[in-house]
């Protein structure tokens, strides 16, 4: 126990030699501790029931989600809360007394006639169910009925996250992705215990979120994308549906409105936002750093306040991301003036600001989160922010940027910070990555996916898999469980699951796919 889980050497696909069973520790992210009971198994059968704590809606939802996940492949009813727990049932239990699980951990006891997940919150129960999914044969991920058996290896897993913040980002501004595409990605990341989805909603090439007080942002500013396609945007209803869908999977949406740079779509929609009063044309290229809101005009702050107010209203989560990156056409002094007026607006509408690390130079209040995207392991402004108490979110571009090519020959992606192999995406430690940023200052990690070159869900999946699971493991698993040899074996075992899920992943030569 309490060590890197050992991948089982004798399984690799749908019908491994050990009776169709995975090994207990064969999970991504690696659990904190794994104690197998050799030779014993639990089986999901036609009459298996799922039990949730009575009177707890959220925990019941977790049970319902598990039921909906397993019904299509098993073809079993998996009835919820039917009578008292019986032999062969799955039981989800809330119990505040198990302190070592923290707020989001779980303990899973798998025995021959009972599978129990204990947690102190519905969040922990959800994570337990995601581990359970990975312990079933890969065909459990099928969306049509398959033949059993459905064994789960027996033993005990005790598991909890190392970092609170485990995020994925999708750039829906450079290329627009519709609600169904977003839901598809949310499903994919949820199984690796990602708990934040950062949506890069605005950029030079498009404005993707409806704002009632400034309607041309979407009708005009959302009408194209990189390469000149039609673009698109989310209505408020659609955005609310995305937030709900994510929440059902324990994921909080963090909306980003990037400013003062990366704003050509807004500037093109409203002439009065430009210092010279003239609206530039829409932009469909991929250069960065040429646009800026007009720092000297009062209307700029009315605009920003309206947008922040409306986006905050749509966002139940704690955070609102205000970008702040690559403001190359704004002087340092203007940048500071702009941020010192905008930061209080985020707080006025009840949200905690997040910004790309450049905004640290505007000394945001100490609750504000600073997102590091550089390629160096030392950055003075970030170190000073950490010193002041700002939580640091790590998304080092040469490690966790999913848009970087895997190697020179990768057809999709950019390469300014890469190329980045799976191994490079995995082999770094968020707790020691940056000089003068101690682990205690690190809120967590993010894997951003910029979409200059990506137009389909296949493209998203090809860039994200297998690097997203690598970053997810860095955010969740204890440092003692980090082990490249173990990870590459476990990631190989995910491939049959991805095939069942229709995920078009990259077959890296570093992984021993079977
Ligand atoms: C830099 S990272 C950007 C984005 C690009 C990305 C491409 C950051 C905060 N800004 O505008 O899309 O590189 O890799």
Image (cartoon, rainbow, N blue to C red):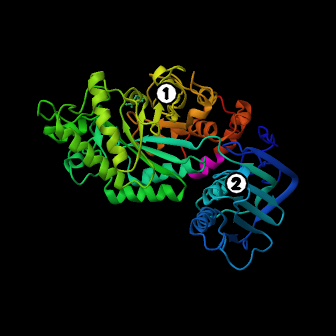
Give the x, y percent position of residue 84.
74, 77
Q: Is residue 330 visible?
A: no
Query: Which quadrant of the picture is home to ligand 1?
Result: top left
Q: Nearer the viewer, residue 199 or 26?
A: 199
Whole-percent x and y of residue 450? 42, 35
- Mark with earlier residue (2, 1): 2
| Label disc, if present, on residue 106 of the rendered structure | 2
Q: Is residue 211 magenta?
A: no
Image quadrant for the C terminus? top right
Q: Circle 1 sits on which residue?
A: 397
Q: Give the main secondary structure, helix, strand or loop, of the magenta stretch.
A: helix
Pointer 2 with pointer 1, Cβ within 8 A = no
Residue 218, x across and y down, in percent: 24, 48
Q: CA distance from mark 2 to mark 1?
A: 32 Å
Judged left or right of residue 189, residue 493 is: right
Does the closest atom of ligand 1 sit within 8 Å of the Cβ of label 2? no
Q: Which residues are magenta?
A: 496-502
Q: Dot 1 surroundings within 10 Å: few (below 14), some, or many (20 or more)?
A: many
Q: Residue at x 73, y 71 (%)?
A: 48
Q: Residue furthest right?
A: 39
Q: Secondary structure at mark 2?
A: strand
State the residue in front, 221 or 498.
221
Q: Is residue 336 above or below residue 25?
A: above
Q: Describe the element under mark 1 as helix, strand or loop.
A: helix
Q: Is mark 1 within 8 Å of ligand 1?
A: yes
Left or right, 466 with respect to 8, comes to left
Q: Quadrant of the N terminus?
A: top right
Residue at point 31% right, 56% down? 235
Does the image show residue 270? yes
User: On screen, 10 above or below 431?
Assistant: below
């Amino acid at each position: 126990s309490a060590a890197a889980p050992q991948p089982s050497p004798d399984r690799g696909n749908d019908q491994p030699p050990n009776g169709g069973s995975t090994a207990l520790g064969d999970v991504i992210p690696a659990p904190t501790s794994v104690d197998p009971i050799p030779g014993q198994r639990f089986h999901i059968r036609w009459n298996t029931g799922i039990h949730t704590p009575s009177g707890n809606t959220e925990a019941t939802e977790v049970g319902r989600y598990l039921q909906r996940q397993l019904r299509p492949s098993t073809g079993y009813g998996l009835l919820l809360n039917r009578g008292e727990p019986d032999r062969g049932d799955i039981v989800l239990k809330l119990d505040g007394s198990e302190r070592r699980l923290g707020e989001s951990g779980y303990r899973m006891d798998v025995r021959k006639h009972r599978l129990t997940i204990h947690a102190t919150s519905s969040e922990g129960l959800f994570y337990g169910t995601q581990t359970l999914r990975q312990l079933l044969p890969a065909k459990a991920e099928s969306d049509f009925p398959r033949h059993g058996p459905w064994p789960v290896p027996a033993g005990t897993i005790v598991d909890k996250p190392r970092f609170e913040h485990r995020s994925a980002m999708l750039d829906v501004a450079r290329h627009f992705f519709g609600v169904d595409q977003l839901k598809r990605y949310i499903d994919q990341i949820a199984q690796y215990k990602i708990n934040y989805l950062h949506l890069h909603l605005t950029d030079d090439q498009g404005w993707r979120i409806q704002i009632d007080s400034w309607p041309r942002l979407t009708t005009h500013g959302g009408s194209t994308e990189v390469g000149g396609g039609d673009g698109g945007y989310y209505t408020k209803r659609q955005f609310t549906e995305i937030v709900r869908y994510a929440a059902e999977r324990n994921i909080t949406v963090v909306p980003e409105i990037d400013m003062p740079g990366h704003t050509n779509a807004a500037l093109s929609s409203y002439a009065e936002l430009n210092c010279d009063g003239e609206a530039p044309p829409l932009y469909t290229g991929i250069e960065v750093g040429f646009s800026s809101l007009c720092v000297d005009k009062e209307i700029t702050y009315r605009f920003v306040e309206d947008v922040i107010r409306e986006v905050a209203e749509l966002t139940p989560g704690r955070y609102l991301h205000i970008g702040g990156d690559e403001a190359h056409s704004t002087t340092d002094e203007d940048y500071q003036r702009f941020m010192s007026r905008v930061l209080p607006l985020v707080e006025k509408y009840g949200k905690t600001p997040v910004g790309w690390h450049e905004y640290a130079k505007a000394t945001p209040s100490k609750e504000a989160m600073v997102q590091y995207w550089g390629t160096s392991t030392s950055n003075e402004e970030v170190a000073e922010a950490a010193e002041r108490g700002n939580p640091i979110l790590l998304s080092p571009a040469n490690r966790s940027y999913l848009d970087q090519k895997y190697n020179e020959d990768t057809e999709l992606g950019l390469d300014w910070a890469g190329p980045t192999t799976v191994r490079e995406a995995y082999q770094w430690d968020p707790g020691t990555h940056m000089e003068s940023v101690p682990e205690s200052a690190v809120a967590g990690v993010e894997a951003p996916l910029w979409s200059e070159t990506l137009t389909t869900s296949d493209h998203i999946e090809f860039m994200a898999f297998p690097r997203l699971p690598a970053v997810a493991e860095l955010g969740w698993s204890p440092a003692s469980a980090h082990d490249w040899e173990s990870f590459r074996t476990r990631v190989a075992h995910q491939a049959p699951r991805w095939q069942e899920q229709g995920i078009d992943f990259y077959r890296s030569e570093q992984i021993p796919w079977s």
